[in-house]
Image (cartoon, rainbow, N blue to C red):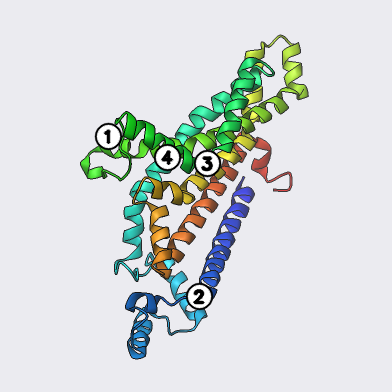
Amino acid sequence: MSVFLARRLVALFLTLLGASLAVFLILEVLPGDPATVMLGIGAQEDSLAALRAQLGLDRPAWQRYLVWIWGWFQGDLGNSYAYDEPVIKIILERLRVSLPLALMAITLSTAIGLPLGVLAAARRNSLTDVSVMGFVQVGVAIPNFWFAILMILFFSVFLKVMPAGGFAGWDAGVWPAIKSLILPAVALALPQAAILARVTRSSVLEVMREDYVRTARAKGLTFAAALWRHAVRNALIPVVTIMGLQFSFLLAGTIIIENVFYLPGLGRLIFQAIAQRDVIVVKDVVVLLAGAVVLVNFIVDMSYALLDPRLRGGGHGQ
């Protein structure tokens, strides 16, 4: 287990380092100048040069990269060009929206997709199975932003029971804040629940065909007992992988949904930062989201060791 953990930690560090370098280089080659955006196209050259020096943009790229990375190790992510505030403060404020939204969405996705997938596998080729697969096809085919607009029209405009957008804020109370996130969470969760149901069904069906499951049935174990004691747990490895990827997507891929519902989260922040050419915010948020993806994948790898004891000794090429 220690070898398995050490390898994953090294891979995590190298992946984060590579992601930071890639983000920095991509933003370096993009056209545009933050100083020009901040002062306007009619600004004098000496004013632009003074602002570039103030922002550190006059230094070589490799120096700016090292300063940026060293700041991460110290917890200093720099100051936003557009907001003139510490980036860490801005990110923490936006995480108060994006993180609960992602957690609500992944909870809904798991609560819907996992039972539906097991149910469809347990009743293969029945009306239940066909109905679940029909839901899966619709969920995968419908874009979440279009589904979000439909929910706004129905629940906010027609029924007037849910807010159409905006965020009440946690200072207004837990329920008003959560109520502001319900429709966005459902819009994010249903397509992911459809994917999770499909993967769960396929994984459970594959495990149910294994010899040890047939042996358990031959020894007198009921179908339900064989399903829950053997099939579901052993089918969880690909399901956990999908869940990890889904949480990463829900945390990093909410730009459209947060703009549809006008939520002040990380997705909307990065959209605004790109429009304002606030390069430092873009770099920090993208690396943070990449780090979240890598960290979730690391947690998924650790869960493999819990689900499959053979991995704890570092075997099977791990």
**Pointers 3 and 4 in contact (C-beta within 8 Å):** no
Please state which amino acid type lies under the numbered disc 4. Ile
Mark drawn on residue 31: 2
Picture disc at residue 143: 3
Residue found at the very far top of the displayed protein: 220
Mark earlier in primary sequence (3, 1): 3
Name the foreground residue: 172 vs 86.
172
Q: How many residues crowd around disc 1 within 10 Å: few (fewer than 14), some, or many (20 or more)? A: few
Residue marked by disc 1 = 175
Q: Residue at x 54, y 38 (%)?
A: 142
Q: Nearer the viewer, residue 203 or 298?
A: 203
Q: Residues within 10 Å of mark 4 (few under 14, many from 20)?
A: some
Amino acid at dot 2: Pro
Decide which of tag 1 and tag 2 comes sooner along the chain.
Answer: 2
Q: Amino acid at mark 1?
A: Trp
Comparing marks 1 and 4, which lies closer to the viewer?
A: 4
